[in-house]
Image (cartoon, grey):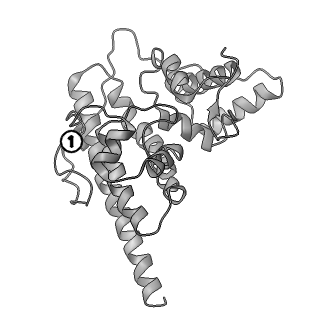
Amino acid sequence: MSPDGFTIGEVLNQLKEDFEDITISKIRFLESEGLISPDRTESGYRKFSDDDIDRLRFILTAQRDHYLPLKVIRDQLDRLDSGEQPAVAPAPSPPIGVTVRADTSAIRNMPPAPPTAGIPDGPWLDAPLTGERIGITQLCEKTGLSPTEARSLQEFGLIGERGTDELDGDDLLVAETARDLLRMGLEARHLRMYQQFTDRELALFEQLAGPLLLQRQPEARRQGVRQLERLSALTASLRAALLSGALRDYVHGG
């Protein structure tokens, strides 16, 4: 192990070969749920130990191979922490010669989700990102953010990964929106909660669409992607409706 521990990006690279669907957002979500507790440097950077990585492997294996919910996994980890041997249920397996195919008829027959600001109309997750990968300097030139503002967004997990200088098209879109919010008086620390909401939402979506995306059949994967797109649009509409109602009550003293 590195004397200073591993960064979240290094942990992702170690786990990616065995867990193809692992993401930085998922690791952050598991931390927010209290399942892992990496150390932090004085600057706030996460530093993972070998034990932290082993713990992540246990969690991810329990989810992938045994389909255990987080509550059960938490109980298993508590047993490990107290020195007991966790009783992990055996993974269910289909009969020999039988191929399991998800029932995607409900997804195929779903009506389109209502249009929502910020969510593209029609299929979009399969589309490649536009533009080349850029650094912080180029991001500032394209968005008008100051280097201090851009680094602050990065520090609070809204763009890129702390300690790196490589950003993509999604980071550019986030930075452009964040710029306008910063100009309205908000600070990057205020925007951090949106990344936390996203991490939680992604974990929920993974539970719903994950079984389809893990299948090898191209049609199943396509249906999984379509399901994610619809979930994204519907939850964005729900958030907008809930916020609209709350603001209306606030304005009218409800």
Q: Residue furthest right?
A: 82
Question: From the viewer's perspective, is residue 107 above or below residue 4?
Answer: below
Residue nearest the viewer, comparing 125 with 214: 125
Res 129 visible = yes
Whole-percent x and y of residue 198?
Answer: 45, 48
Q: Quadrant of the N terminus?
A: top right
Vertical side of 211 occupied by 237: above or below? below
Between 254 and 212, the residue placed more toward the observer is: 254
> What is the residue that sits farthest to the top in this orientation?
96
Find disc 1 in the rendering and name its residue.
Answer: 124
Q: Between residue 105 and residue 42, name the one nearer to us.
A: 42
Residue 85, compared with residue 104, is above or below; it is: above
Where in the figure is residue 231, as x and y percent of width and height?
A: 32, 49
In the rendered view, would you say 237 is above or below 200? below
Q: Residue at x 66, y 16 (%)?
A: 2
SS of the residue under disc 1: loop
Direction from residue 90 to residue 75 in the image, left or right: right
Identified at 42% across, 27% down, the residue is 21
